[in-house]
Image (spheres, helix red, strand yellow):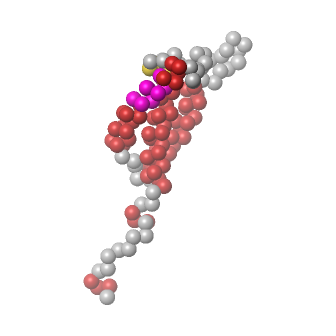
Amino acid sequence: MADETGRRLVTYWSLNAIFLAVVAAVAVAALVARRAPRWKAIGLAAIPLLIMTAVFDNVLVGVGIVGYDPARISGVTIGVAPLEDFAYAIAVVVLLPSLWTLLTPSRSSSGAKRAPRRDDA
């Protein structure tokens, strides 16, 4: 996409792509480490988060606190909020549990003492 002078415009989706790629990489790292986050819980958490995002984004855009350059959005909206705005909520709901699972020590490496066996005496 270019403006009237021929300069290439950075769209909100191209910015989202950078952040969503990082989120996807962290989620894949959690899967590769065989410590996958609980996707069902993530999906259930995403529902109210997206509803709240829709409400608050529509208020912010509708009142004029936040504005978007029409040349840089896809034109698809939910109410008056552009669809691009919902990528951040999706990124957060996937990134945080993925980071949590990666940064939490596994049970085998947590240093827990094993129960003594009878023949250890």
Q: Residue 23: percent from the left, percent from the top? A: 51, 40
Residue shown at 51%/43% (left/top)? 25
Q: Where is residue 90, by image quadrant?
A: top left
- Between 90 and 61, the residue placed more toward the observer is 61
The location of residue 7, given as percent across then percent down, is 70, 18
Name above or below for residue 29 compared with residue 88.
below
Quarter containing the N terminus: top right
Taking the magenta stretch, the answer to whether it contains residue 57 is: yes
> Residue at the front extreme?
63
The part of the image, by quadrant, that contains residue 114 is: bottom left
From this view, report whether residue 3 is shown above or below residue 53: above
Q: Residue furthest top?
A: 4
Q: What range is drawn magenta here? A: 51-58
Main secondary structure along the magenta-highlighted residues: helix
- Most distant residue in the right direction: 5
- Residue 72 lies left or right of residue 89; in this view the side is right
- Residue in the picture at 47% in, 27% down: 56
Rendering coords of residue 29 (x, y %): 48, 48
- The residue at the point 55 percent across, 31 percent down is 16
Residue 46 as seen in the image, left or right of residue 63: left
Provide residue 53's location: percent of width, then percent of height: 45, 30
Q: Is residue 53 above or below residue 28?
A: above
Examine the structure image and report whether residue 17 is included in the region drawn in magenta. no
Task: List the single residue furthest toward the bottom.
Answer: 121
* Residue 60 at least partly seen: yes
Residue 32 visible somewhere in the drawing: no
Task: Work out whether residue 75 or residue 119 is closer to the camera in this orientation and state it.
Answer: 75
Report the quarter where the C terminus lies.
Answer: bottom left
Where 85 sits versus 44, above or below?
above
Q: Which residue lies at the image location 38% right of the left edge and 74% below the top edge? A: 113
